[in-house]
C-alpha cells in the first residue's frame, strides 16, 4: 500500500510541476523547452541475491532530460542489467538474475555561459528478479528444485552536477549523488513472501559519482 501511495504522490507531483511550468513556458516562448537523450557512465551499488551481497557494477543508465524552462529540468531515466549462468554434468543448474531501474530527477538549473549547473534530487524504483532451477539425477531418481522470486527496492537522495556544452546540442558533465536505498522483501512469483524464518529490514547509504553525456534537440 505504501509503495502505491508513494508512486501516486510522485506522479501527481511531476504532473503538477509539468502543467504549471509548461503553461509558464508557453507564455515565455516554447522555443526554450528542449528534450534530449543521455547516458551516464559510472559504478552502481547492486544488491545481488537474497543474502544481499553488495557489488559495484558498471550500470549505464539512459536519461531523457527535459529542460522545461531555463531554470527547471525533469530527467526520467531507465536502466537494465542481466546475469545468467548454467552448468551441466551429473546435475543441471541454471540461474538468472536481472535488475531494472526506473526513476526521475527533478532539478533547478543555472546557466553560466557554456556551463550548466543543476541541483535537486532523484527518486527511483529498482526491480530485481531471480530465477534458478536445479536438476539432479542419481541412478533412476531425478530431483528438481525450481524457484522464482522478485524484489522491489526504492532509491532516493540529493544530487548536484554540471555540464559543459561543446555545441548548442552536445554536453559532457559529471554528477554526484548521496543515495538512500531501502531494500524490499523477496516475494515468490505467486505474490507470497519468500520463505524465511525471520523478518529483515535492510537499507544502504552510499555516494555515487558518474560522468554524463547528453544530446539536446533544438537550440539552446
Image: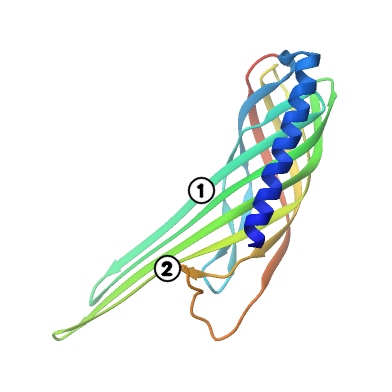
Q: Tell which circle, 1 or 2, labels the residue nearer the N-terminal end.
A: 1
Residue that label 1 marks:
80
| Residue 84 in which image quadrant | bottom left
Q: Secondary structure at mark 2?
A: loop
The vertical placement of 219 against 189, above or below, is above
Colour option used: rainbow
Residue that label 2 marks:
190
Residue 45: percent from left, percent from top: 63, 58
49 relative to 95 in the view: left or right? right
Tell me, yes or no, if residue 163 can be seen here. Answer: no
Which mark is on residue 57?
none
Residue 81: percent from left, percent from top: 49, 51
Residue 132: percent from left, percent from top: 37, 68
Q: Secondary structure at mark 1?
A: strand
Q: Nearer the viewer, mark 1 or mark 2?
A: 2
Residue 59: percent from left, percent from top: 56, 49
Instruction: Please identify the quadrant where the C terminus is shown.
Output: top right
Instruction: Please identify the quadrant where the N terminus is shown.
Output: bottom right
The vertical placement of 146 against 104, above or below, is below
Q: Residue at x 66, y 71 (%)?
A: 202
Farthest left residue in view = 140
Tell me, yes or no, if residue 189 can be seen here. Answer: yes
Front in this rendered view, residue 125 or 1:
1
Mark 1 closeness class: few <14, some 14–19, many ≥20 residues within 10 Å:
some
Q: Residue at x 67, y 36 (%)?
A: 75
Give the Cα separation between the discs numbered 1 and 2.
23 Å
Amino acid at each position: 500500500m505504501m509503495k502505491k501511495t508513494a508512486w501516486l504522490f510522485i506522479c501527481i507531483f511531476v504532473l503538477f510541476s509539468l502543467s504549471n511550468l509548461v503553461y509558464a513556458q508557453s507564455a515565455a516562448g516554447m522555443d526554450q523547452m528542449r528534450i534530449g537523450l543521455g547516458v551516464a557512465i559510472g559504478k552502481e551499488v547492486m544488491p545481488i541475491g537474497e543474502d544481499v551481497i553488495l557489488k559495484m557494477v558498471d550500470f549505464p543508465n539512459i536519461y531523457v532530460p527535459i529542460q522545461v524552462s531555463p531554470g527547471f529540468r525533469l530527467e526520467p531515466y531507465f536502466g537494465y542489467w542481466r546475469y545468467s549462468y548454467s552448468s551441466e554434468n551429473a546435475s543441471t543448474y541454471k540461474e538468472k538474475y536481472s535488475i531494472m531501474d526506473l526513476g526521475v530527477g527533478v532539478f533547478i538549473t543555472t546557466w553560466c555561459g557554456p556551463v550548466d549547473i543543476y541541483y535537486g534530487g532523484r527518486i527511483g524504483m529498482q526491480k530485481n528478479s531471480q530465477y534458478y532451477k536445479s536438476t539432479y539425477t542419481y541412478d533412476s531418481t531425478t530431483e528438481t528444485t525450481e524457484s522464482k522470486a522478485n524484489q522491489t527496492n526504492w532509491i532516493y537522495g540529493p544530487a548536484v552536477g554540471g555540464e559543459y556544452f561543446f555545441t548548442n546540442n552536445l554536453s559532457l558533465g559529471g554528477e554526484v549523488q548521496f543515495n538512500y536505498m531501502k531494500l524490499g522483501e523477496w516475494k515468490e512469483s505467486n505474490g507470497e513472501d519468500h520463505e524465511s524464518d525471520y523478518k529483515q529490514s535492510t537499507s544502504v547509504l552510499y555516494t555515487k559519482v558518474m560522468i554524463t553525456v547528453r544530446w539536446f534537440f533544438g537550440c539552446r
